[in-house]
Image (tube, grey):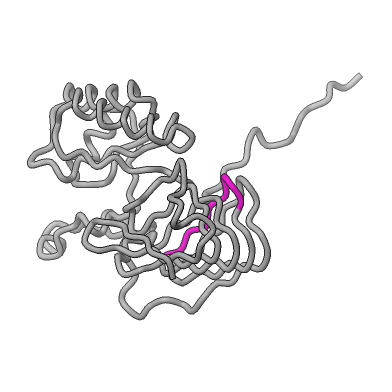
Amino acid sequence: MNAKVDTADACDLRFGQVGIACVRVRRADAAALCDELERRVRAAPQMFSRAAVVLDLSHLLSLPDDAVVEALLEAVRRAGMLPVGLAYGTSDTEALARRMGLPLIAKFRAAYEPAAAEPARRSEPAAREQQREPILSAPAPGSRQGTQHHAGSVRSGQQIYARDRDLIVTGAIANGAEVIADGNIHVYGGLRGRAMAGAQGDETARIYVSDFRAELVAIAGHYRVFEQIPDDLEGQSVQCWLEGEKLLLAKL
């Protein structure tokens, strides 16, 4: 009697859009970081409790040593978030990520590369590595490919992403659903979930909503979370835009 052999693959491996928040560290102070993140988690627990986050150390004057980085990672965990990687910075950051046993998340990798220094240090392997990551910096002005339309509702847990273009949704966006665009977002319906425009760093992007009841809106990484919608905005037609690093909202 022949034994049955399971010839199916052990798993599938796929790449897709994943919602990961970025914690940009401005001071290598683990206690202060924990306090600040705990405040964010308390303010919006459904959004930030056990949220996957990337630690960005590129805004520090110098890269901290391993013990300090371990303390920062532990501070993130104590606050109730889950660090899943380090943001790309330099070759030193890459070495640090290897020592920490964490992946390097390189969504905006080109933003960290000094243009003047590239020709001097770029090797053939580095050039091949860059070819594997073709969409890491913001699109050049005027390079968008038109507009992506989504007809109908976006269900809870569903995500719509318009790469290098604007997004128009003609339907409701449920709680727990996400719409993301590298350009502007227009929602001709109720927004109860999350809308993130300028996903590749375009700070001129805007969000327009016919019926505003959002969990979160974000432009170029600057966000506002709503545990309770302000009375003057709930159910109204609203636009969102950036002024400097401040995300503003107003009725249309």
Q: Nearer the viewer, residue 29 or 136?
A: 29
Among the 4 quarters of the image, the one containing residue 122: bottom left
**What's the residue at 16%, 40% (across, down)?**
26
Q: The N terminus lies in which quarter of the figure?
A: top right
Q: Is residue 170 left or right of residue 36?
A: right
- The extreme front residue here reads 231
Q: Is residue 134 left or right of residue 115?
A: right
**Does 167 appear above or below 34?**
below
**What's the residue at 56%, 53% (across, down)?**
159
| Residue 51 locus on image (x, y percent) | 43, 34
Among the 4 quarters of the image, the one containing residue 200: bottom left
- The extreme left residue here reads 61
Q: Which stretch did the figure color magenta? A: 174-182
**What's the residue at 67%, 37% (across, down)?**
9
| Residue 147 locus on image (x, y percent) | 51, 76
Q: Is residue 246 left or right of residue 157?
A: left
| Residue 76 locus on image (x, y percent) | 31, 27
Q: The C terminus lies in which quarter of the figure?
A: bottom left
**Does 171 appear above or below 146?**
above
**Does 209 appear above or below 92?**
below
Magenta run includes residue 199: no
